[in-house]
Image (tube, rainbow, N blue to C red):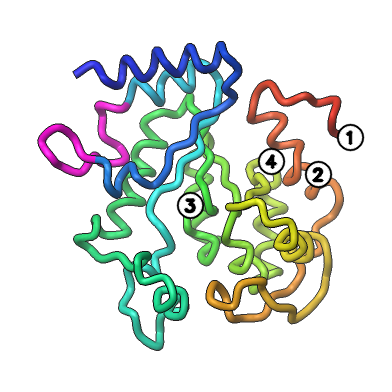
Protein backbone atom coordinates (compact mmCIF):
# COMPACT_ATOMS: atom_id res chain seq x y z
CA UNK A 1 0.00 0.00 0.00
CA UNK A 2 1.33 3.42 -0.96
CA UNK A 3 3.92 2.08 -3.41
CA UNK A 4 2.40 3.80 -6.45
CA UNK A 5 2.10 7.10 -4.59
CA UNK A 6 5.77 6.87 -3.64
CA UNK A 7 6.65 6.04 -7.25
CA UNK A 8 4.66 9.06 -8.43
CA UNK A 9 6.59 11.31 -6.05
CA UNK A 10 9.84 9.79 -7.29
CA UNK A 11 8.76 10.44 -10.87
CA UNK A 12 8.12 14.07 -10.01
CA UNK A 13 11.63 14.35 -8.58
CA UNK A 14 13.08 12.56 -11.61
CA UNK A 15 11.49 15.10 -13.93
CA UNK A 16 12.94 17.92 -11.84
CA UNK A 17 16.31 16.22 -12.31
CA UNK A 18 15.88 16.14 -16.09
CA UNK A 19 13.83 13.05 -16.97
CA UNK A 20 11.71 13.58 -20.09
CA UNK A 21 9.58 10.44 -20.10
CA UNK A 22 8.81 7.11 -18.47
CA UNK A 23 9.58 3.69 -20.00
CA UNK A 24 7.53 0.66 -18.96
CA UNK A 25 8.95 -2.66 -20.08
CA UNK A 26 6.93 -5.79 -20.78
CA UNK A 27 7.69 -7.13 -17.28
CA UNK A 28 4.46 -5.35 -16.34
CA UNK A 29 1.86 -7.87 -17.38
CA UNK A 30 4.45 -10.62 -17.82
CA UNK A 31 6.41 -11.25 -14.66
CA UNK A 32 5.63 -8.51 -12.13
CA UNK A 33 3.67 -9.95 -9.21
CA UNK A 34 2.16 -8.40 -6.12
CA UNK A 35 2.76 -9.39 -2.51
CA UNK A 36 0.30 -12.27 -2.86
CA UNK A 37 2.12 -13.64 -5.89
CA UNK A 38 -0.56 -12.69 -8.40
CA UNK A 39 0.32 -11.24 -11.80
CA UNK A 40 0.03 -7.46 -11.81
CA UNK A 41 -2.15 -6.57 -14.77
CA UNK A 42 -1.16 -3.74 -17.07
CA UNK A 43 -4.30 -1.84 -16.08
CA UNK A 44 -4.05 -2.59 -12.37
CA UNK A 45 -5.77 0.39 -10.69
CA UNK A 46 -3.12 0.41 -7.98
CA UNK A 47 -0.76 1.90 -10.57
CA UNK A 48 -3.10 4.73 -11.57
CA UNK A 49 -1.25 7.40 -9.54
CA UNK A 50 1.83 6.88 -11.71
CA UNK A 51 0.02 7.36 -15.02
CA UNK A 52 -1.88 10.33 -13.62
CA UNK A 53 1.35 11.93 -12.44
CA UNK A 54 2.92 11.47 -15.88
CA UNK A 55 -0.01 13.32 -17.41
CA UNK A 56 0.24 16.06 -14.82
CA UNK A 57 3.97 16.43 -15.55
CA UNK A 58 3.29 16.37 -19.32
CA UNK A 59 5.79 13.61 -20.00
CA UNK A 60 5.00 10.65 -22.26
CA UNK A 61 4.88 7.05 -21.10
CA UNK A 62 6.35 4.60 -23.60
CA UNK A 63 5.07 1.13 -22.83
CA UNK A 64 5.94 -2.26 -24.28
CA UNK A 65 3.17 -4.76 -23.59
CA UNK A 66 3.24 -8.40 -24.72
CA UNK A 67 5.15 -9.51 -27.83
CA UNK A 68 4.17 -10.42 -31.41
CA UNK A 69 0.97 -12.47 -31.40
CA UNK A 70 2.76 -15.21 -33.32
CA UNK A 71 4.67 -16.05 -30.15
CA UNK A 72 1.36 -17.33 -28.74
CA UNK A 73 0.32 -19.20 -31.89
CA UNK A 74 1.07 -22.88 -32.55
CA UNK A 75 4.65 -23.40 -33.67
CA UNK A 76 3.86 -24.93 -37.04
CA UNK A 77 4.23 -24.22 -40.76
CA UNK A 78 1.56 -21.51 -40.54
CA UNK A 79 3.50 -19.46 -37.98
CA UNK A 80 5.53 -16.72 -39.67
CA UNK A 81 7.78 -16.51 -36.62
CA UNK A 82 8.59 -20.23 -36.64
CA UNK A 83 12.29 -19.76 -37.38
CA UNK A 84 12.61 -17.03 -34.77
CA UNK A 85 10.97 -19.25 -32.18
CA UNK A 86 13.14 -22.20 -33.20
CA UNK A 87 16.32 -20.15 -32.80
CA UNK A 88 15.06 -18.23 -29.74
CA UNK A 89 12.83 -20.75 -27.88
CA UNK A 90 12.63 -18.54 -24.81
CA UNK A 91 10.33 -16.21 -26.75
CA UNK A 92 7.52 -18.78 -27.04
CA UNK A 93 4.43 -17.87 -25.01
CA UNK A 94 1.12 -19.49 -24.19
CA UNK A 95 -2.23 -18.64 -22.66
CA UNK A 96 -0.78 -19.47 -19.26
CA UNK A 97 2.69 -18.02 -19.85
CA UNK A 98 1.91 -15.45 -18.72
CA UNK A 99 -1.61 -14.85 -20.10
CA UNK A 100 -3.41 -14.83 -23.47
CA UNK A 101 -2.13 -12.21 -25.93
CA UNK A 102 -5.59 -10.68 -26.30
CA UNK A 103 -5.84 -10.33 -22.53
CA UNK A 104 -2.56 -8.44 -22.24
CA UNK A 105 -3.37 -6.08 -25.10
CA UNK A 106 -6.87 -5.43 -23.74
CA UNK A 107 -5.36 -4.53 -20.37
CA UNK A 108 -3.10 -2.01 -22.06
CA UNK A 109 -5.95 -0.42 -23.99
CA UNK A 110 -8.12 -0.10 -20.88
CA UNK A 111 -5.26 1.66 -19.16
CA UNK A 112 -4.85 4.05 -22.09
CA UNK A 113 -8.55 4.90 -22.06
CA UNK A 114 -8.65 5.40 -18.29
CA UNK A 115 -5.99 8.12 -18.47
CA UNK A 116 -6.95 10.35 -21.42
CA UNK A 117 -4.79 13.24 -20.19
CA UNK A 118 -1.63 11.15 -20.31
CA UNK A 119 0.27 10.64 -23.57
CA UNK A 120 1.18 7.01 -24.14
CA UNK A 121 3.63 5.78 -26.77
CA UNK A 122 2.62 2.26 -27.77
CA UNK A 123 5.89 0.51 -28.55
CA UNK A 124 6.20 -1.58 -31.70
CA UNK A 125 2.99 -0.13 -33.19
CA UNK A 126 1.18 -1.84 -30.32
CA UNK A 127 1.88 -5.13 -32.17
CA UNK A 128 -0.65 -4.16 -34.83
CA UNK A 129 1.76 -3.31 -37.66
CA UNK A 130 0.35 -6.38 -39.43
CA UNK A 131 -3.21 -5.06 -39.01
CA UNK A 132 -3.16 -1.35 -39.77
CA UNK A 133 -6.93 -1.21 -40.18
CA UNK A 134 -7.32 -2.32 -36.57
CA UNK A 135 -4.59 0.04 -35.38
CA UNK A 136 -6.36 2.87 -37.18
CA UNK A 137 -9.54 2.10 -35.23
CA UNK A 138 -7.60 2.07 -31.98
CA UNK A 139 -5.90 5.40 -32.63
CA UNK A 140 -9.26 6.95 -33.47
CA UNK A 141 -10.65 5.63 -30.17
CA UNK A 142 -7.65 6.79 -28.13
CA UNK A 143 -6.40 10.25 -29.15
CA UNK A 144 -3.85 10.23 -26.31
CA UNK A 145 -1.90 7.37 -27.91
CA UNK A 146 0.96 7.61 -30.39
CA UNK A 147 3.02 4.76 -31.83
CA UNK A 148 6.59 3.90 -32.78
CA UNK A 149 7.76 1.17 -35.14
CA UNK A 150 10.88 -0.34 -33.59
CA UNK A 151 11.35 -3.96 -34.72
CA UNK A 152 8.25 -3.96 -36.95
CA UNK A 153 9.54 -2.21 -40.08
CA UNK A 154 9.34 -5.53 -41.93
CA UNK A 155 5.58 -5.59 -41.41
CA UNK A 156 5.29 -2.15 -42.98
CA UNK A 157 7.62 -2.94 -45.86
CA UNK A 158 5.47 -5.76 -47.19
CA UNK A 159 2.34 -3.57 -47.39
CA UNK A 160 3.77 -0.29 -48.71
CA UNK A 161 0.55 1.17 -50.11
CA UNK A 162 -1.50 0.54 -46.99
CA UNK A 163 1.40 1.67 -44.81
CA UNK A 164 1.80 4.90 -46.78
CA UNK A 165 -1.91 5.64 -46.36
CA UNK A 166 -1.56 4.99 -42.63
CA UNK A 167 1.51 7.22 -42.29
CA UNK A 168 -0.25 9.95 -44.22
CA UNK A 169 -3.37 9.84 -42.05
CA UNK A 170 -1.52 9.56 -38.73
CA UNK A 171 1.59 11.52 -39.62
CA UNK A 172 1.38 13.49 -36.36
CA UNK A 173 1.18 10.37 -34.20
CA UNK A 174 4.07 8.21 -35.42
CA UNK A 175 7.60 8.23 -34.00
CA UNK A 176 10.71 6.68 -35.48
CA UNK A 177 11.69 3.77 -33.26
CA UNK A 178 14.52 1.26 -33.14
CA UNK A 179 15.07 -1.51 -30.61
CA UNK A 180 18.85 -1.34 -30.57
CA UNK A 181 21.76 0.81 -31.73
CA UNK A 182 23.03 -1.18 -34.70
CA UNK A 183 23.90 1.46 -37.33
CA UNK A 184 23.99 -0.92 -40.30
CA UNK A 185 20.36 -1.88 -39.65
CA UNK A 186 19.11 1.68 -40.05
CA UNK A 187 19.54 1.39 -43.82
CA UNK A 188 16.56 -0.98 -43.91
CA UNK A 189 14.39 1.53 -42.07
CA UNK A 190 15.40 4.43 -44.30
CA UNK A 191 14.90 2.34 -47.43
CA UNK A 192 11.34 1.37 -46.45
CA UNK A 193 10.41 4.90 -45.39
CA UNK A 194 12.12 7.02 -48.03
CA UNK A 195 12.53 5.07 -51.26
CA UNK A 196 10.29 3.36 -53.77
CA UNK A 197 12.67 0.43 -54.09
CA UNK A 198 11.11 -2.96 -54.70
CA UNK A 199 11.66 -6.49 -53.46
CA UNK A 200 14.57 -6.05 -51.07
CA UNK A 201 15.38 -8.15 -47.99
CA UNK A 202 15.08 -7.47 -44.30
CA UNK A 203 18.36 -7.49 -42.37
CA UNK A 204 17.51 -10.47 -40.13
CA UNK A 205 16.58 -13.70 -41.86
CA UNK A 206 15.00 -15.27 -38.77
CA UNK A 207 12.89 -12.19 -38.11
CA UNK A 208 11.27 -11.70 -41.52
CA UNK A 209 11.92 -13.93 -44.49
CA UNK A 210 9.78 -11.95 -46.96
CA UNK A 211 10.82 -9.18 -49.34
CA UNK A 212 9.91 -5.55 -48.72
CA UNK A 213 9.03 -2.44 -50.71
CA UNK A 214 9.60 1.25 -50.08
CA UNK A 215 6.77 3.60 -49.15
CA UNK A 216 8.36 6.68 -50.71
CA UNK A 217 7.08 9.04 -48.02
CA UNK A 218 7.34 12.79 -48.78
CA UNK A 219 9.80 14.94 -46.85
CA UNK A 220 7.16 16.71 -44.76
CA UNK A 221 5.96 13.39 -43.31
CA UNK A 222 9.49 12.05 -42.91
CA UNK A 223 10.50 15.10 -40.87
CA UNK A 224 7.56 14.54 -38.53
CA UNK A 225 8.37 10.85 -38.11
CA UNK A 226 12.10 11.41 -37.66
CA UNK A 227 12.04 14.32 -35.21
CA UNK A 228 9.21 16.86 -35.32
CA UNK A 229 6.70 14.64 -33.54
CA UNK A 230 9.28 13.76 -30.91
CA UNK A 231 10.04 17.45 -30.34
CA UNK A 232 6.34 18.04 -29.70
CA UNK A 233 5.71 14.98 -27.52
CA UNK A 234 8.93 14.68 -25.50
CA UNK A 235 9.89 17.73 -23.42
CA UNK A 236 13.34 19.26 -23.03
CA UNK A 237 14.80 18.24 -26.38
CA UNK A 238 16.98 21.03 -27.78
CA UNK A 239 15.03 22.12 -30.87
CA UNK A 240 18.01 24.08 -32.18
CA UNK A 241 19.69 20.78 -33.04
CA UNK A 242 17.09 20.05 -35.71
CA UNK A 243 16.20 21.79 -39.00
CA UNK A 244 12.77 23.27 -39.64
Left or right of 10? Residue 129 is right
Q: How many marks?
A: 4
Tell me the CA gap for discs 2 and 4. Answer: 10 Å
Residue 67: quarter of image: bottom left
Residue on which disc 3 sits:
126
Mark earlier in primary sequence (3, 4): 3
Q: Residues within 10 Å of mark 3 (few under 14, many from 20)?
A: many
Identify whether 201 is placed above or below 31: below
Look at the numbered disc 2 and give the secondary structure of its residue: helix
Q: How crowded is mark 2: few (under 14 residues within 10 Å), some or many (20 or more)?
A: some
Residue at the left extreme of this rendering: 36
Residue on which disc 4 sits:
172
Look at the numbered disc 4 and give the secondary structure of its residue: loop
Instruction: Tell me if residue 44 is in the magenta stretch.
Output: yes
Q: Are marks 3 and 4 in contact (CB under 8 Å)?
A: no
User: Measured from the top left, where is residue 42 in percent x and y?
Assistant: 31, 40
User: Measured from the top left, where is residue 186 in percent x and y?
Assistant: 73, 58
Give the magenta-colored segment's residue range.
Answer: 33-47
Instruction: Tell me if residue 82 is in the magenta stretch.
Output: no
Tell me the CA gap for discs 1 and 4. Answer: 17 Å
Q: Are marks 1 and 4 in contact (CB under 8 Å)?
A: no
Residue positioned 40% across, 74% down in the render: 85
Residue on which disc 1 sits:
243
Identify whether 65 is placed above or below 80: above
Prevailing SS of the magenta stretch: loop
Q: Are marks 2 and 3 in contact (CB under 8 Å)?
A: no
Q: Do the residues labelled 1 and 2 touch (CB within 8 Å)?
A: yes
Q: Work out which quarter of the rendered image holds the C terminus and state it.
A: top right
Tell me the CA gap for discs 2 and 3. Answer: 22 Å
Amino acid sequence: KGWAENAARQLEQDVKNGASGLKIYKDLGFSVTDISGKRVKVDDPRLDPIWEKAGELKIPVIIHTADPKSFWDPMDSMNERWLELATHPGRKRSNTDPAPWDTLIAEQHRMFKRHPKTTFIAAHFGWYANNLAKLSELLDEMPNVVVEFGAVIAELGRQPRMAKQFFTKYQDRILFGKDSWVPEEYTTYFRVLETEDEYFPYHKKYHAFWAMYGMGLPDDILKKVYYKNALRIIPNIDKSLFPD
